[in-house]
């Protein structure tokens, strides 16, 4: 993976196809945890961490268990033709969910042991990430983008991990922008019926239109 | 026909078997890893932390100096904090915590917030302020729109911060703490950009209603009722309750109630005998109230 490709992934996941603002993934934490900037940053960090790890773990699961290719474990064990063992359709979503959930559990235990301070500030957000569709989204997108006919494109694994990381960064960017605006909205003179979530959704849509402006970049 | 249908719609056996084994296998592997991890990474918590946490009111107000009740519970059990610091819980909670930990507590007096300013509607304005209607925002612009750089700005950040609805507004527009509802959570102390609030023992009735640290002349220029630092009250005190600090009279509440001569000696009337049960009038009968000095005007 050259510098150019890495840069393309970076720009496209953070700005052009921002997970929250262009792909509309992970909207519940985006609305729920963006009331103040410090918790938005906490959530963002936790998501970056989990997305990167999830990309690193789901890639081999797909490559060696699900994809109908010659490196498929079942094909190696039982022979026949790789096409017989195409588990993508039936198992991809559920096995990725399983992987991510287990991963989050593990990370939670680990942080709790290793850094109680961090655990206390991330604790609840970490658990929330299990059900964050953006994490599942990045795992699935990695597969869609960096595999062709079930074969990894060159540098596929690294690209997946990088995309996991930058997707998290894009998510954090959106969260922090949103939380800053919402902190300001708290004291603004917003008409009564629009206070709270309604105005936040309007702001989100305007922000998402603004991010559309990046479309020409790639 | 039937067979063709089945073949079309059913997954091949070669799909089902790996699928079941694969997913089951993943599940088992992760299950084992997590089980081992939960053993290895188990964190031992002192059971008393949970007990103390159950006793605490759980409102995470921060009056104890910790960000939340959990932090305080940790510190108390670890012996890093006194059991009496939970203001909303009061003596009751302190007592219960002490029982759990086997400590003795000396109950302090209940505290309530008090606002050291008398300005209100009579204050003069430096400029017309038309920005975000909060004291915090207004205080940022040229020292605030109020002529007195120490006085109440009057957008009631304090009232907004109080979760206990413990405020009244005096006829002159000043926020007044209702001692019956105040739990001494310090939210208003932290919210007021002018730092006008202080927690005072509830039995104390005499207070100084000014926070202006400027010299007498400068105070007179901006406020008719501010402390000019003439030190008359200091001289009249019978027990050194009042002292001068940066040109402002301050009361040391631990030295007992201020005597009536000291209260009456103030030429600008900034020392008030303040009856909590009657904050709306703001003009409690000073003399009468203090004559029966031994019994406080009210006890909440
Ligand atoms: S926060 Fe301070 S300045 Fe604002 S209204 Fe309350 S006492 Fe006055
Ligand atoms: S915020 Fe309300 S309850 Fe808390 S100290 Fe101030 S007046 Fe008392």
Image (cartoon, coloured by chain):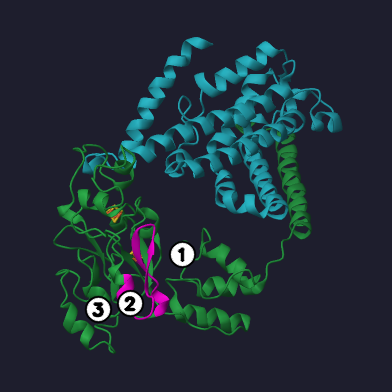
Chain colours: A cyan, B green
Q: Is the residue B153 above or below the residue B262 in the image?
A: above
As helix, strand or loop, the secondary structure at mark 1 comes to loop
The earlier-in-sequence mark between 1 and 2 is: 1
Do callouts 1 and 2 mark residues in contact (Cβ within 8 Å)?
no
User: Residue A5: x percent and y percent?
Assistant: 66, 13
Q: Are marks 1 and 3 on the same chain?
A: yes
Q: Which residue is mark 1?
A: B63
> Mark 2 — on which chain does it sit?
B
As helix, strand or loop, the secondary structure at mark 3 comes to helix
Q: Which residue is mark 2?
A: B237
A137, A45: nearer the viewer: A45
> Mark 3 — on which chain does it sit?
B
Horizontally, residue B276 falls left or right of residue A59, namely: left
Q: Residue at x 60, y 54 (%)?
A: A120
Q: Is residue B23 visible?
A: yes
Assess whether residue B251 is covered by the magenta stretch: yes
Tell me where residue A96 sits by quadrant.
top right
Cβ of mark 1 under 8 Å from ligand 2: the answer is yes
Q: Is the residue B15 above or below the residue B233 in the image?
A: above
Assess whether residue A42 is covered by the magenta stretch: no
- The span picked out in magenta is B234-255
How far apart are labels 2 and 3 at the CA level?
7 Å
Q: Which residue is mark 3?
A: B261
User: Residue A158: x percent and y percent?
Assistant: 73, 23
Q: Classify mark 1: residues with Cα within 10 Å, few (<14), some (14-19) or many (20+).
A: some
B205, B137: nearer the viewer: B205
Q: Are marks 2 and 3 on the same chain?
A: yes
């Amino acid at each position: 993976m050259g510098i150019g490709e890495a840069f393309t992934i970076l720009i496209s996941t953070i700005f052009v196809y921002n997970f929250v603002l262009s792909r509309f993934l992970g909207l519940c934490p985006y609305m729920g945890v963006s009331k103040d900037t410090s918790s938005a940053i906490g959530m963002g960090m936790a998501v970056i961490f989990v997305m990167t790890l999830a990309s690193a773990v789901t890639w081999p699961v797909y490559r060696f268990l699900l994809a109908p290719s010659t490196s498929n474990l079942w094909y190696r064990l039982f022979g026949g033709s790789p096409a017989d063992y195409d588990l993508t359709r039936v198992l991809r979503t559920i096995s990725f969910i399983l992987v991510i959930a287990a991963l989050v559990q593990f990370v939670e235990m680990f942080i709790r042991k290793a850094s109680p301070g961090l655990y206390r500030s991330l604790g609840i957000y970490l658990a929330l990430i299990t059900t964050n569709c953006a994490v599942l989204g990045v795992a699935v997108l990695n597969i869609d983008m960096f595999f062709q006919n079930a074969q990894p494109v060159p540098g596929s694994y690294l690209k997946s991990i990088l995309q996991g990381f930058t997707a998290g960064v894009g998510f954090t960017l959106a969260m922090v922008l949103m939380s800053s605006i919402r902190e300001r909205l708290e004291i603004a003179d917003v008409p009564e019926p629009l206070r709270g979530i309604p105005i936040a959704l309007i702001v989100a849509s305007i922000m998402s239109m603004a991010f559309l402006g990046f479309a020409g970049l790639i | 026909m039937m067979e063709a249908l089945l073949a079309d719609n059913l997954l091949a056996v070669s799909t089902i078997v790996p699928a079941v084994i694969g997913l089951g296998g993943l599940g088992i592997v992760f299950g084992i890893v997590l089980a081992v991890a939960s053993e290895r990474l188990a964190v031992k918590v002192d059971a008393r932390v949970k007990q103390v946490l159950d006793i605490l009111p759980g409102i995470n107000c921060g009056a104890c100096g910790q960000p939340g009740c959990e932090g305080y519970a940790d510190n108390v059990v670890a012996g890093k904090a006194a059991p009496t610091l939970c203001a909303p819980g009061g003596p009751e909670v302190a007592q219960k915590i002490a029982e759990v930990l086997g400590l003795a507590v000396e109950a302090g007096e209940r505290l309530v917030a008090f606002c050291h300013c008398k300005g209100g509607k009579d204050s003069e304005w430096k400029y017309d302020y038309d920005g975000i209607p909060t004291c915090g925002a207004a205080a940022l612009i040229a020292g605030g729109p109020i002529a007195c750089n120490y006085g109440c700005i009057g957008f009631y950040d304090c009232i907004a911060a109080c979760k206990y609805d413990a405020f009244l507004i005096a006829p002159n527009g000043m926020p007044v703490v209702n001692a019956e509802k105040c739990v001494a959570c310090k939210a208003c102390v932290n919210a007021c950009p002018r730092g006008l609030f202080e927690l005072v023992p509830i039995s104390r009735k005499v207070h100084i209603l000014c926070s202006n640290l400027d010299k007498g002349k400068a105070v007179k220029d901006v406020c008719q009722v501010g402390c000019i630092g003439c030190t008359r009250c200091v001289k009249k005190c019978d027990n050194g309750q009042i002292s001068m600090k940066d040109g402002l009279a301050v009361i040391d509440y631990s030295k007992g109630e201020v005597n009536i001569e000291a209260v009456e000696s103030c030429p600008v009337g900034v020392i008030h005998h303040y009856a909590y049960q009657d904050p709306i009038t703001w003009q409690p009968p000073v003399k009468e109230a203090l004559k029966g000095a031994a019994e406080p005007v009210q006890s909440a």
